[in-house]
Image (spheres, rainbow, N blue to C red):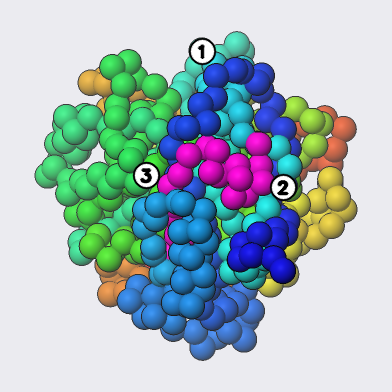
Amino acid sequence: MSTPFSQHLILKGSHKPAPNAHPVEGIKKSELMNVTLRLKSGQPLPDLLDPAVQKNFKPVSRQAFAEQYGTSKEDVAVVEAFAHHEGFSIVRVEPHKRAVEIRGTITQMENAFKVSLGNYTNTEGYTFRGRTGNILIPKELEGIVEGVFGLDTRPIATAKIKMKKQPKTPPSPDVSYNPPDVARLYNFPTGATGKNQCIGIIELDGGYNTSDINSYYTSLGFSAPTLVAVSVDGAKNNPGKNVSDSDGECTLDIEVAGTIAPDATIAVYFAGNTTKSFQDGVNAAIHDTQNNPSVISISWGGPEDTSEASYYTTFDQDFQAAATMGITVCAAAGDSGSSDGETDGKVHVDYPASSPYVLGCGGTTLQANVQAGTITSEVVWNEPDNGGATGGGVSDIFPLPTYQANANVPLSPNTQQAGRGVPDVAGDADPATGYNILLGGETEPIGGTSAVAPLMAGLLARINELLGKSAGFINPVLYANPSVCRDITQGNNETVSGVDLYAAGPGWDACTGNGVPDGTKLLGILQQ
């Protein structure tokens, strides 16, 4: 007769390939580590991709969500019993986040989950803990535990920021803009400043200098912002002595979103760049009852990888939870064109922008006369000499959502299957026509789709103020009313040869989605 927790089964979707890195000696099996167990919901989340559900759905409060959809006490008790049986300490139990975090030695984790852990160093010189193959869980946890994260700490995402580089060929005349100028050019609604709103920003590395932020606001005629740094998994606001892309990312996000909605609270959630911490950071923002962000901006992501399916399954449930609570999530579509930086000769989209519950934000090159308030040209951002091109394409993980049924999303060139099309909207992202950002005491133009996610977050903060409520999951409304966007019809994001091109054209395309939102038109539709 077997004893409790002695029979093990493969955790569905947990298979992970060997790290693309060199194994190194020296892992200490007595070293302590934390792991997050993601659990099933107490009851199924509403399927907001179903038009019938969308039609009559009313967002629920964070408190109501916890009561209705949090993991049941019975399931939590089984997980706690497992933790005690294995000698783990329990760091946190958060049923509303469907999470239990445990702490133990590497040896304990290897024994409990039947994995072998080792240290690896990648080509950038970063050392991390990795594993290969499947995770096994006790039979008693089957159907309760849906994901185990933290065993493997390889980096999962990159910042979608692009600094201006010296071009190799004569480009179009370089220009740069202050974020409020772009807001005016895009007809963002006036008479709103994000008052009584909170924008949540996710950062996986780096930090900001308060002096940069305050000086930047002052230079644009605003008072210093209400800025809150939230630590997740021990990560903190940690700007380097020398400015890094991560510091630039954090500063860009705050200065773009914050000066478009200058009276909004900006809550920055600092987490680590792993599957565990990325999810923990997003969950911290979604379920934050103190700051209550109504819109979340994410400018970090990575190419979809079909190997560890549980990462996408559990993470996407978090974005579904955000939609259920009326929270809009904006994510950068990537800065490496149709390949998303991969070199396998295939096309890839960036996650989390490819989540059907997320507003995927692509990039353009914008030429405008700020004084006259007129746009002279706006095309797909594809400027290799300046370091990048907008991401976009068709997901190989998520099926075509109903709201894109009439968008003429092409089949995936990789699989010839229908999938979620990325992006949904677009905005200025070319660093050669970028945003004037104060970083390390100096002003410089910065771009990337990293800028478009906080741009849209600032817009939503204004809209939410004027609505008197959260706009929430706007994707179905956007696709039902594509005329709220100004169509971008020129350019492509080709970076992979030998595959079908993604080119801009009338209607939705895999470069700029539906186009650039006219903020006032979008407000009008959401007011109906």
Q: Which residue shows up at 70% across the image and 58% down it?
A: 8
Give, as a three-letter code, the residue at label 1.
Gln
Q: Which is nearer the eye, 121 or 209? A: 121
**Upstream in sequence: badge 2 or badge 1:** 2
Q: Which residue is mark 1?
A: 166
The stretch in magenta equals 97-116
* Left or right side of 415 for 370: left
**Upstream in sequence: badge 1 or badge 3:** 1
Question: Where 458 sits versus 203, above or below?
Answer: below
User: Where, by quadrant of the figure, is residue 61 drawn?
Assistant: bottom left
Q: Is residue 383 magenta?
A: no
Q: Secondary structure at mark 3?
A: loop
Q: Which is nearer the eye, 298 or 77? A: 77
Q: Which residue is mark 3?
A: 233
Q: Position of residue 514 (x, y in %)?
A: 60, 57
Q: Position of residue 41 (x, y in %)?
A: 53, 73
Q: Which residue shows up at 43% across the image and 25% down it?
A: 245
Give, as a three-letter code, the residue at label 3.
Asp
Q: Residues within 10 Å of mark 2 (few under 14, many from 20)?
A: some
- Label 1 and label 3: CA atoms lie apart by 38 Å
* Left or right side of 158 for 337: right
Q: Which residue is mark 2?
A: 134
- Label 3 and label 2: CA atoms lie apart by 25 Å
Q: Which residue shows up at 30% across the image and 37% down it?
A: 236
Question: Where 121 sits versus 205, above or below?
Answer: above
Give, as a three-letter code, the residue at label 2.
Asn
